[in-house]
Image (cartoon, grey):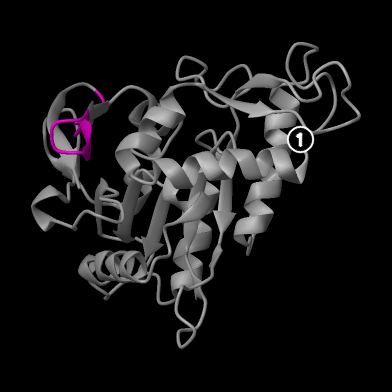
Amino acid sequence: MTVFSKEADFEQALIEVLFTKGWEKEILYYPTEQDLIENWAKILFDNNRERDRLNDQPLTDGEMAQILEQIENLRTPLKLNGFINGGSVSVKRDNPADPEHFGKEISLKIYNRKEIAAGSSRYQIARQPQFPTKSPILHDRRGDLMLLINGMPVFHLELKRNGVPVSQATAQIEKYAREGIFTGLFSLVQIFVAMEPNETVYFANPGPDGRFNPDYYFHWEDFNNELINNWKDIAVYLLSIPMAHQLIGYYTIADQSDGILKFYVATNTMQLQQFLTG
């Protein structure tokens, strides 16, 4: 069994397994929020080039700003889950290179939960994403990994080397959230994953108004309901495609009664047993 004395080595090993489980091999290294916005704009263009959508003309900065404004207005993971699973987003064209639609509203495909590892679905890994802090006295932060579906950062992973308890990874996620890291484009994160080589927990993003509750930090299980803790098995069974795509697309509950995002999440791939809440 490999022992990771350095977090970077663990990170690299995990990425290499994810490559074999449906994630693209072209890594997005040290991306800023703006880098990821531009990456998303390219994917949106590729998936919406038809005449009745973008008419083969790329999105402008102004059009992307419209999408980001919608995200900021929705704000909570609950509402943003509805945004993602709604499958499309509308913008008013301001690109003069598309006179047919200039000044008109068009609809763009952003996600199709049925297109798992097929069609226009894209699965990217962002390594060491950079987060600007909201405080002038705090240094900017850097995460470990983000997993992007169709350009949207929907999973955030924090990793620790052997000998460091997984609770330190969950504490880091909680700290980042308190500092306002998961806002703007990063408010699209739906699921947090805290990992060390021998234990993994995953949980919903409670959003800016919610609170982290360790009672809803879950472990993955095998078909016999035995805990899966080995990092490689987690990569194969929990973070693989199609499971990661399904977690976002199918096992979500928009519970308006309490305003908290809930996932009806399988603890294994055969049996959906419990709610994952923030």
Badge 1: how crowded within 10 Å, few (<14), some, or many (20+)? many
Residue 267 lies in magenta, yes or no?
Answer: yes
Q: Residue furthest front?
A: 103
Q: At 19% from the left edge and 58% from the top edge, which residue is drawn?
A: 212
Q: Position of residue 215 (x, y in %)?
A: 8, 52
Would residue 24 be visible to someone looking at this image? no
Quadrant of residue 47 within the rendered picture: top right
Vertical relation: 67 (above or below) 168: above
Q: Which residue is mark 1?
A: 59
Q: Can residue 193 be seen at all in this image of the molecule?
A: yes
Would you place residue 111 above or below residue 159 in this image?
Answer: above
Vertical placement of residue 224 versus 27, above or below: above
Residue located 25% across and 55% down the image: 209
Name the amino acid type tagged 1.
Leu
In reply to whether residue 89 is colored magenta, the answer given is: no
Residue occupying the far top of the picture: 52
Estimate the x, y position of residue 262 in percent, counting from the top left.
21, 35
Quick check: 274 left or right of 85?
left
**Camera-side residue of 43 and 88:** 88
Residue positioned 83% across, 33% down in the render: 95
The magenta-colored residue range is: 255-269
Q: Position of residue 133 (x, y in %)?
A: 48, 73
75 or 185: nearer the viewer: 75
Q: Is residue 65 depicted above or below 199 in this figure?
A: above
68 on left or right of 156: right
